[in-house]
Amino acid sequence: FQLVKETLITQALSVVQEDYDLHRMPDSEYDFIVIGAGSSGSVIARRLSEIRDWKILLIEAGEGEMLLTDVPVLAAYFQKSRYDWGHKMELQEGVCLGMNNEQCYWPRGKAVGGTTVMNYMILNRGNRIDYDRLAALGNPGWSYKDVLPYFRKSETANLAMADEGYHGDDGPLSVEDVPYRTPIVHKFLEGAAQLGHDILDYNGKSQFGFGYVQSTTINGRRCSTAKAFLHDVKDRPNLHILTGTRATKIIIDPQTLTAVGVEFYRNGKFMTTYAKKEVIVSAGTFHSPQLLMLSGIGPRAHLEELDIQVVNDLPVGQVMYDHICFPGLSFTVNITRASLILREAMLPNNVIGWLHGKGQLTMIGGVEALGFIKTNKSKEIEDFADIELIFIGGTMASDYGTGVRRGMDVKQEIYDAVFKPIENIHAWTVFPMLMHPNSRGYMKLRSNDPMDYPLLYGNYFTDASNQDIDTMVEGIKYVIKIAETEAMQSIGSKLNERPIPGCSHITFGSDEYWRCALRHLTATLHHQVATCKMGPESDPEAIVDNELRVYGINNLRVADSSILPLEPTAHSNGPAIMIGEKASDMIKEY
């Protein structure tokens, strides 16, 4: 009876959506207007509304999450869902050749909670060197010692391996070990240790090594920034939230160059509300620069080309970096019940187990461990990784091509040739990820219509020295080296040597083959940064200063991962939450 009862409740709740909306017309004026309820905006709305005398409006284009988004193992299925903007990179010759239309798919969260409603829940803050260099670029207040208190402030950590002094114990965001681990991940870390790597808390004293993944989950359920920072405060009388509402323009007084309000589209109508103190743009790496440009803040020539009146000539969107990875490796093993196979994971005992915070459904898309290595292509003297290794206790075949393949938009013919033959076979993979790309992308407006998506240019592997692709090749070879360790061979790890169509004419396993493979399976991990770059006034590419104030415009800030001038050795969600915390303290000095 209890099993039937819980199953019926689960089915019923799967269609229930968390409601955050104000359900009436917003007021005509607020103290602060925050645009975007994602990784940064959710934090800012919570922290600013702690001051009861301030009235806050939070505008979000998406809707609230539902029960199924809570199931970590289903992460891939929310790409191309109603929680995803569904962006695509513009066509680029020689990359993304194995994706449909030879075009890379760039997921981006459209929800209260932003991309944290559909990401893989990996918490990786980055290396202390990232932040010390950020400060050294002319951004005082952003060194590691400056930002660590904000990382700690956000979280309540429940980790078996946690360095003292590096984690929080009373923040809104739950950070924990994934409750379920496959037997393969233990062998993977054992193999890394056999190669001389430290097994450590990579969000602790040192990042340089390997460790079990730390996840933004709570008792095996997704802990989005909506759940962490907004759910328990959404009824504060001084916090109004508009969902299903798209900001279309920042209203700027042309005489004083002051942001005074926001135009938005809601329920089929354009509306306006005003800000007495500030407008804070936290719409993400694509939509924050888009909104600035639609409001007249951007490159003069580009705006004039689109008949947008120029308010301030700034190089918005002219710099963009991205973390790319290679999802094409797979290794079978000779043991059973060893890895994630979705058909087994969805059995009733696992569903019931998840309701109690246990079992395979608690796996964050299958990710179980991270490793940070410095390849022989690195020019760094310090322990500063150029490749992150993302260990997954499964492969693209684990969900029969219905999740990861679909989310990355990989061609069916590639899946059928390489991955379909290992369906229902226990296997593992590692995605090598390029941490510090030299190749620079950019973005611009498609038109002056705020409903049009921006044009996004990745410019993958375009650096003159070819260091990006050469580093990725070395990352792939290092994964194979780990697979050959005594620990991984004790479970019969064997590389799947089925060639990628389009590369089969090249000797499998050669550097030339891996370069071809990388140009076919070129996948983003949606960590784009730098489109609203932070920097000193002397930096010709800077959009905001070290207090996130837009140059030349009063009472306007950008606070999200778009302000990061370079890719950190991180997954961008953690830094974006930190930016929200730090921005909130800056704004509270108003």
Image (cartoon, grey):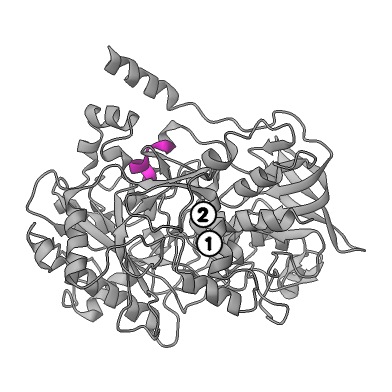
Query: Residue 67 falls in which quadrant of the image?
Result: top left
What is the three-letter code of the residue carrying label 2? Answer: Arg
Task: Indicate left or right for 475 with 577 as reference.
Answer: left
**Residues in magenta, as a range:** 69-76
Task: Indicate left or right for 197 with 450 as reference.
Answer: left
What is the three-letter code of the residue carrying label 1? Answer: Leu
- What residue is at 25 percent from the left and 34 percent from the top? 346
Task: Indicate left or right for 500 with 314 as reference.
Answer: left
Residue 74 belongs to magenta span: yes
Q: Nearer the viewer, residue 364 or 503?
A: 364
| Quadrant, the C terminus | bottom right
Pointer 1: residues within 10 angstroms few (<14), some, or many (20+)? Answer: some
Residue 21 belongs to magenta span: no
What mark, if any, has residue 25 been given in the picture? none
- What residue is at 20 percent from the left and 67 percent from the top? 193
Please report contact status of discs 1 and 2: CB closer than 8 Å, yes or no. yes
Q: How far apart are marks 1 and 2 (CA)?
A: 6 Å
Q: Name the residue under label 2.
A: 152
Q: Name the residue under label 1.
A: 148
Pointer 2: residues within 10 angstroms few (<14), some, or many (20+)? Answer: some
Where's residue 124, x and y in %?
42, 59
Q: Is the magenta stretch mostly helix, strand or loop?
A: helix
Residue 109 visible in rendering: no
